Image (cartoon, rainbow, N blue to C red):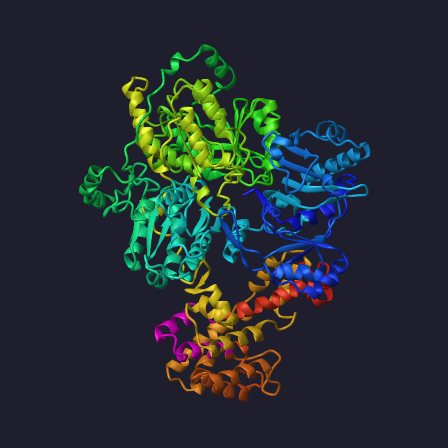
Amino acid sequence: MSAKAISEATGKDILNRFLNVNGASGAAQCRFATVNTETDWSQLTVQNPWLLNTPLVVKPDQLIKRRGKLGLIGVKKNFEQCKQWIGERINKDQKIGNAVGKLRNFIIEPFVPHEESEEMYVCIYSHRSADTILFYHQGGVDIGDVDAKALKLDVLVNNQTSVEEITTKLLVHVADAATKKRIANFIFALYNAYVDLYFTYLEINPLVVTKDNMYILDLAAKLDATADFICRPKWGDVCYPPPFGRDAYPEEAYIADLDAKSGASLKLTILNRNGRIWTMVAGGGASVIYSDTICDLGGASELANYGEYSGAPSEQQTYEYAKTILTLMTSSPKHPDGKVLITGGGIANFTNVAATFRGIITALREFQPKLVEHNVSIFVRRAGPNYQEGLRKMREFGSTLGIPLHVFGPETHMTAICGMALGKRAIPQTATAEFSTANFLLPGGQQAQSELKAAETAVSNNGGIGSSPQSIKLPPISADDSLTNDAVSNNVANAHSRKFFSNKTKAIVWGMQQRAVQSMLDFDFICRRDEPSVVAMVYPFTGDHKQKYYWGHKEILIPVYKKMSDAVRNHKDVDVMVNFASLRSAYDSTLEVLEFPQIRTVAIIAEGIPENMTRKLIVAADKKGVSIIGPATVGGVKPGCFKIGNTGGMLDNILHSKLYRPGSVAYVSRSGGMSNELNNIVSKATDGVVEGIAIGGDRYPGSTFMDHILRYQADPEAKLIVLLGEVGGTEEYEVCAALKDGRITKPLVAWCIGTCASMFTSEVQFGHAGSCANSDRETASAKNKALREAGAYVPDSFDSLGDLIQQVYAELVKSGRIVPKEEVPPPTVPMDYSWARELGLIRKPASFMTSICDERGQELLYAGMPISEVLSKDVGIGGVVSLLWFQRSLPPFVCKFFEMCLMVTADHGPAVSGAHNTIVCARAGKDLVSSVVSGLLTIGDRFGGALDGSARQFSEAYDSNLHPMDFVNQMRKEGRLIMGIGHRVKSINNPDVRVKIIKEFVLENFPSAPLLRYALEVEKITTSKKPNLILNVDGVIATSFVDMLRNCGSFTSEEAQEYINIGAINSLFVLGRSIGFIGHYMDQKRLKQGLYRHPWDDISYVMPEQFN
């Protein structure tokens, strides 16, 4: 949502800080104090001492309109009376209209003595082409119909107003010249603040204008929340309160936070905490339609929530969303009829259905006992990329859930599951599921299809899943469109006949959207285009290069440019730009492309562009004669010619919806997700789509319904027009006017979604930014009524939209105005390897195998243990080593042993070879990794690497039952050193403390340490010959490590021997010494040591004799 209401206190605080920055407003600072359930009254008077010595006004601050009329303002009260007034109302139920809620937030202000004649009215609001300033010289609670009374000044987008213009157009009824000037200055400053601070609505009633000052008494305002990334430094942390009658729930705040941190869209509004009907719907438009259908079926009072997830959320994000819904559902009281969860959605364009379903399944599995306890029934309908796998997994999981779980795909009408869930429609025992994708049969599809043949016949005999049980009376079709008035036809043709796309259309794509580009190229190929539609890409974050894509069976290269100017200059035949820039950069990148006359159409995909920026883009595009599709859209499609980005979804949906060749039906909708559903509906009801555009869900789409409907009216290939409007805005009334005055003569089937809005007791902002009715005229019901009266074909509900389209189409075929298109089989496009593997169509041996770590799921796993558990159990570094090196959680004494070894082997001074190498490299200017690696490469039999050799020698001798003396004699006889025995500095008289620490720990904590004891016996023999032939650190760690493997109880003897053979014991020294090497590197850098050169006097130069 973009325009969000703020509290009166927030609005006055913002104006206090910035109103006078935008010119001398002449208004007094707004003094106020806020009170809620947690207010400390004694502290309140300390922070606002004026409360104790000023007459006061007190009122609730919860987005309540006409508080004076409702008796919700206390006037001329002292502080104690205000406390009493609030105490009598706080946390008490209050009914306002149909909404019942508790008063929890109040605002106290100084009472301003004034005459009624000093009250005035000021309001500023934004619409598509301008900001409108309203002024009336009388204000207050009895102002009445201000729209009819007030004087208006429209400030066009990108224009400015002046004090003089305000004076002449708004203040004609203000007699006093000085007062008029003061008010004009105030309105001028107010408007500048309005624009600079991205307000979308600002009403002051009354503005009190006394001889000495001006006072803002009551204020109502909305901000463009999408401008947060611009205005946060000025706004501060703004809290957007819910409409009165609906409490703010922490779960809503949690989902809003997830939404803010995600590139996807996640929305949640709790309507009835104790309702029995819960929804989890994918798609902004689809979510509204599901709510409509539930309300139409009589479920409004039991509908618990409104929400949507869309825009390709990750598995983890979907899990969090589903978990939140299930928490709410199962924490409210049980319902005698049980509860239902409707997990629906349209046909996705680019969201991986299987991935999102994995998140939902994980949440359902987690809540399985509670779902059974609350007697929950689940109904699923979804389609889109990889939906077959998603539905299959959902069906498999449903058989183990212990509650009814019914699963349907695109063969079922989108909202049919609502009737099933509410007991208004029979539940088919077997769904006619799709078992192929594109031209490929999915695993198990052959068997499943044969099993379903009989079921499909039974379903078709019953009228089909999703067919409406009611018959629709079809109004008569008007006269043939070829016989329309010539003048009307000429006007339409001149203004709106430009075709956006053809089979020769060439486009530039802004952004590194490889999947979307490949989708466009695959569409081109199955449409039998001669050349790819995407000829270049622009990505300013890399240098110029080429990107590889597939064109049918072969690979092609598409150039990627750093600058838009280079792309346009090198590709003169381009006239379309598909802009995938983020909401922060879409404005600038679109303005840039408008400078190139050859670009005639721009599609802006990003959602959340501030409304002021969008309006400026619309003005700039209009001046250049450029058409904009979007923002907040998936784009559009012209079958057989061109598609924008991810429109139409995967190839299987494009083939099923017959988008590879033109049909006879043209549609326009707001919703991108619903445009794909329309593709499906139209393909089943008619010979297919000739063109379809999703204009976008924002309040101000770049092009309007009428822009495209008039194009379709002028297009001889478009025989039937479909409009899918929605609640909010008034664009549909322009369509009504065009139907009445004859500009639209072709049959028009129309439906506006959002009819449920009037059934809610409080205002609900639906998924799209523009889906909110600000007046009765903007409701979906009013629009549907107006369209029907104007001559459009309007169904009774979305459920019957497809049936009405089919009947109108059949009438057109019968009358000869449509000759159904002949089916032409499209060429086969090879499926991408990664997608084919995900669908289970192919198999290939993996290049790598791993058994210690898995990062693919909701959280990282170490040997099967979630990282959260690793941290919560505080297993330490030793525990992590045990998981990643040995695939199991080893006993605490083993983990402690690992950590001791790491500590004692971390460093042994700068003189040893590894540290020396690290220091030399660091001083030579090498980076951290290179320096540490140079040190690690010195580890071997002579330095540090004796652990494996020592373990092998001692264990072989011990296992052979060699007496320690025989072992020493044998090694001497063979001329081999005993690994782990001997030290350059330490001796029996100067023992190594590190050895002592480890030896004592092992002997005290290990269940058994026979090999260490054997090594200590060997040490007695060797030190008797020479004092420095002691058991060194390598030896004590190596023998202790073997004892751990053999005696800790976690390994078999074969496993223990395998770890010895593969050289695992040396790992402790490598890991430990890396710590020291890093320390030496950082030390040298910190000391800023220069290049090391070894001194001559420490080198013995011995040249060959013949050269001396």
- Location of residue 805 (image quadrant): top left
- Residue 840 place in picture, x, y as percent: 32, 47
Q: Which residue sits furthest top?
A: 486
Task: Say whether residue 826 is visible.
Answer: no
Pick the residue in front: 1012 or 616.
Answer: 616
Image quarter for residue 220?
Answer: top right
Range of magenta residues: 1037-1066
Q: Nearer the viewer, residue 872 or 924?
A: 872
Left or right? Give the position of 337 relative to 709: left
Quarter of the figure that contains the N terminus = top right
Closest to the observer, 397 or 341: 341
Q: Is residue 1048 magenta?
A: yes
What percent of the width, then of the height, locates residue 646?
44, 36
Residue at horizontal 82%, vertical 34%?
A: 178
Tell me how many marks there are: 0
What residue is rendered at 31% in x and 59% in y? 401
Report which quarter residue 942 is drawn in.
bottom right
Q: Quadrant of the C terminus?
A: bottom right
- Which residue occupies the foreground of this view, 615 or 293? 293
Residue 581: image location, x then y, percent: 56, 38
Residue 502 drawn in magenta: no
807 versus 55 height, above or below: above
| Magenta: main secondary structure | helix
Percent position of residue 657, x then y: 34, 33
Residue lying at 51% horizontally and 85% vertically, measured from the top left? 1019
